Image (cartoon, rainbow, N blue to C red):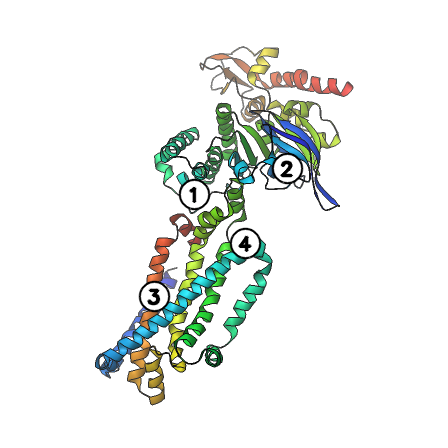
Amino acid sequence: MISFNHVTKSYGEEITAIDDVDFTVEQGKIVVLLGPSGCGKTTLLRMVNQLETITKGEIIINGENSKDLDPIELRRKIGYVIQSNGLFPNMTIEENVMLVPDLLGWSKKDKRTRFEYLMKLIGLDAKDYGKRYPHELSGGQQQRIGVVRALAADPPVMLMDEPFGALDPIIRDKIQEEFLQIQREVKKTILFVSHDIDEAIKMADKILLLRDGEIMQFDTPSEMLAHPKNEFVSQFFGKDRAIKSLSLHTVENLREVIGLGPVDESIQDTKTIHIHQDLRNTLSMLLNQEADQVIVTDEQGENIGTITIDLVQKYLHFEIKGKMSASQEG
Amino acid sequence: MKRKKMIGNIVRYSLYAAVAAFFIWAVSNNYFGYIFTQSETFLVLLRQHIVLVLVSSVLAILIAVPAGILITRPKFKKAEWVVSNIANLGQTIPSLAVLALMISVLGIGFQTAVFALFIYSILPIFRNTVAGLDSIDKNMIDAAKGMGMKPHQILFRIELPNSAYSILAGIRTAVVLNIGTAALAYVVGAGGLGVWIFTGINLFDNGFLISGAIPVTLLAILADYILRKIEYVVVPKGSRRIEKA
């Protein structure tokens, strides 16, 4: 758990970079720091591992005030991932990943076991990749290594500064999925900086939206999309926030509320979609193909019904827009 | 592309031909004779030359590399331009002037020559050390810091290995230049192969001149070759590729 207690950072009298920020990242949750560039999100992140100083207030990490901790010790207990992966070109992949365990004096055997486990997490062969150098890997692979390097000493807390920002959209999407998968297994407390709204909606348990070092809103993604607290928040998420919010709902949610359409055996070649797929992807799939329906499959791969644009629209109307307008009236 | 390669080949082979012609000319006139007829003197001069280069180069490395490291530390960063300018200034004074000036302080002989060569070797080593350390990606240092590496660990495990190529290139430049400049040691009576070169010039004797000059050239080529080999061993495999790219 990371608690920010009225944290302020100012440069001299004039400039306030972080203004009285107060929030908590719960154990095992991801909080995404979101906002336009220069809003102070990276500064806020770097205050946690003391790469930036705190002018006023305090940051409590798992019950300990960060000010009372030795910065070197503290940083070794916090995983740190940066955008340009920060891998060291003079070291092999194994040396890179095992750097913090090495600093902590782990035995050779422990390091080996841990390395094999971590490489398994990201689906790379430990034997093959261990001896390679960073420049021999693709950008996506390098970033994966950057992520597992931060996980190496099994730190309870992770700081991620736009970790997937430099990747192309397709790879980014894949690595985000992969990372969420890993997170379900390792359950770290994560502070994640992003300027990408879609990424924030996808990754966050809660989003902290910042402007000029001030908190605009701290909420779950769906709350933030449905009930923006002020003009800035609603503008930041844009006019299409209803569509954006579709990515927070799955086909299964839709089935529970309004049910799926019947399977029409006469139509051939329709595509299928998995029941846990989100509705935003479903909608784009519907729009991209000529048939006006796709078949929904369950975990066993059985066809359990169909979904159409009309159904998505209906769901959007009832579930999302309905809630949005209700809140505006209230 | 093909044209470029062809021109490259023509230049290369004409160069080889010129060198070969030179050797044939020199050998047929018996210009290398002194190396064999006065081999004892030759070996003494050669040893003097090598010792001059070795002592001054090692001293320069011992001073310039740590100075380069020190000046790139955050605490001393502000002093960088002062030190760089002093090092540059040292390089602008003509080598003969340094020798002449130093005679009045250190007298005639070995120490004066070593001092002058040392002054000349400092700049390339210092400058390349600073450039190598400065060229390291700041994000990489940030990552190292954020992972909890101590400053000395960052220096020895990240900064130095990744700037080794640049530092060694500086040392190589300095040593090769040094071998040539060491011929001037004769002027202050410190011996070396310059003795034969200057004798040759003074007496219009091509034999002395070439018997002194060719070994100096070969020495420089040999030193360059050996230092490249060392570079290959010292520079980490991973950062080697990046330097080339």
First along the sequence among labels 1 and 2: 2
Question: What's under tag 1, amino acid-wise?
Answer: Pro
**Is A41 or A312 nearer to us in this picture?**
A41
Discs 1/2, front: 2
Task: Give the labeled residue for mark 3.
Answer: B223
Q: Are labels 1 and 3 on one chain? A: no
Check the residue under mark 2 and report the chain it is in: A
Q: Do pointers 3 and 4 mark residues of a single chain? A: yes
- Residue A145 picture location, percent across and down: 45, 36
How many neighbours does mark 1 have within 10 angstroms: few (below 14), some (14-19), or many (20 or more)?
A: many
Image quadrant where residue A250 sits: top right
Residue occupying image coordinates x 71% and y 29%: A234
Look at discs 3 and 4 and give the one toward the viewer: 4
Element under disc 3: helix
| Residue on which disc 4 sits | B73
- The secondary element bearing badge 1 is classed as helix
Decide which of A15, A296 is in the foreground and name it: A15
Q: CA distance from mark 1 to mark 2?
A: 29 Å
Name the kind of residue labelled 3 in the image.
Ala
Q: Position of residue A282 (x, y in %)?
A: 56, 22
Q: Which residue is mark 2?
A: A44
Q: From the viewer's perspective, is B144 left or right of A94? A: right
**Label 2 element class:** helix
- In the rendered image, residue B135, in percent from the top left (x then y), is placed at 51, 54
Q: Residue furthest right?
A: A329
Q: Which residue is mark 1?
A: A134
Measured along the vertical axis of the image, is residue B219 above or below residue B105? above
Q: If the image is split into quadrants, where does the N terminus of chain B sit?
A: bottom left
